[in-house]
Amino acid sequence: MTQVMKGIRVLEVAQFTFVPAAGAILADWGADVIKIEHPVRGDTQRGFVQLGGIKVNPNRSPFIEHPNRGKRSVGVDISTPEGMEVIYELAKTADVFLTNYLPNQRQKMKFDIEHIRAVNPNIIYARGSAYGDKGAERDTGGFDGTAFWNRSGIANALTPKELGGPLSQGIPAFGDSIGGMNIAGGISAALFHRERTGETSEIDVSLLSTAWWASGTSIDMGADSGEIMGNRMPMSGANPGNPLMGNYYTSDGETINMCTLTPGPHIKNFFEHIGQAELADDERFSTPKALMENWEAASDIIVKAFAEKDFAYWRKKLKSYTGQWAPVQSLLDIATDDQALANDMFFEVEASDGGAPIKLVRGPVQFNHAPVQTTRAPTASEHTEIVLMEMGMEWDKIEELKSKGAIA
């Protein structure tokens, strides 16, 4: 794997998934990411024992592995003056400072941008927040369930009005992982800019801005037209206006998603695939204009056709269809999807408990077709002594800091 960030050091003072996910991506790309954790409890997320009704083994937690693989953990109590001195010494050696602490916390503990830049003027300072680093709510905390899912409008847009209330976020750390990738991209651009010009940057990514970018097409259209697209209740049938778009139920209750946005070139091929080739010559369906005008009649025919065969049949049959479609899969199904696996979307790390390797999802960017090669997430404070000795700290000083509880 090409380590495009080899030689870059990131100092991460952050918890949970959103900002640490950015550190994980940079570590995947070869950066040396130093994760600062509380000397006693570590990252607060290490204490999670249940998530979405699923029990979490703290000694084997994909919830920790996903945003922390490839890093080194240093235990520092940043609430103490001695601990902050260690942070400043580490900052002197870093290219990037990465945090998701709130502004009042950063100021109180003296690791806001002016404090870090005082010891390293060339460092790139990256912040992740719920709602942005400007405005009246810059000190308001939040998670992806609040800022990304609900306040952003995503929950409202995805909820059919017939339900009478918003859908809850069904995927943990959904916006966090997307936002972490955004931060990693911003850091990459800032490093490139510094290399070209010598100028350093500060970076802000919020969960709210992440959601707005992800929903940008709908928001832009709504702002311009005063109308917004919404979702509808599940059904077997076409989207209004285009029968080659919509969900169709198979005989065994599974779903095929037809997503042929421009049906014209595919009309004949599609009707052949559902066993009704003669419909391509039917004047109601033979041209794109006619097909869209008679979309309800076409939808009724397609609903019946899909209902005659099972999911496995349609998955195989539609492989030769010239238009766009997809099987509707679960997150467990995708773990065995041949195309996902062919593109190295899973990789393995050793487990800290000595058990079977843990499978993790790679980031969305792949360099030179190579799979990710990285290490497991560190245990809390696993690399404290190694990292501090690397930067020249004597063992007596390390022991002194340990005795004061400033490090672990």
Image: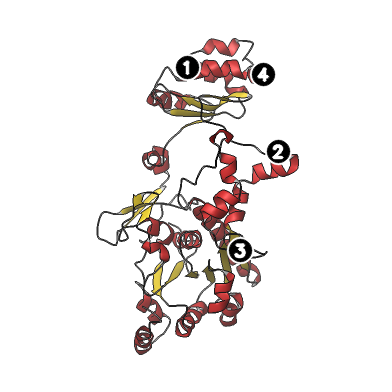
Mark 2, Cα crowd under 10 Å, few <14 / some 14-19 / many 20+, is few
- Which of 178/30 is in front? 178
Calculate the distance from the C-alpha at mark 3 to the C-alpha at mark 4: 47 Å
Calculate the distance from the C-alpha at mark 1 to the C-alpha at mark 4: 20 Å
Q: Which percent across, then down, holds residue 218?
A: 65, 42
Calculate the distance from the C-alpha at mark 1 to the C-alpha at mark 2: 35 Å
Q: Secondary structure at mark 2?
A: loop
Q: Which percent across, then down, holds residue 38?
A: 41, 73
The first of marks 1 and 4 along the sequence is 4
Q: Which residue is mark 4?
A: 293
The first of marks 3 and 2 along the sequence is 3
- Which of 26/63 is in front? 63
The first of marks 1 and 3 along the sequence is 3
The first of marks 1 and 2 along the sequence is 2
Q: Residue at x 38, y 88 (%)?
A: 397
379 with respect to 97 (left or right): left
Three-letter amino acid code of the residue under disc 3: Asp
- Which of 24/199 is in front? 24
Q: Which percent across, then down, holds residue 151?
A: 60, 51
Three-letter amino acid code of the residue under disc 2: Glu
Q: Residue at x 48, y 62 (%)?
A: 26
Q: Which residue is mark 1?
A: 305
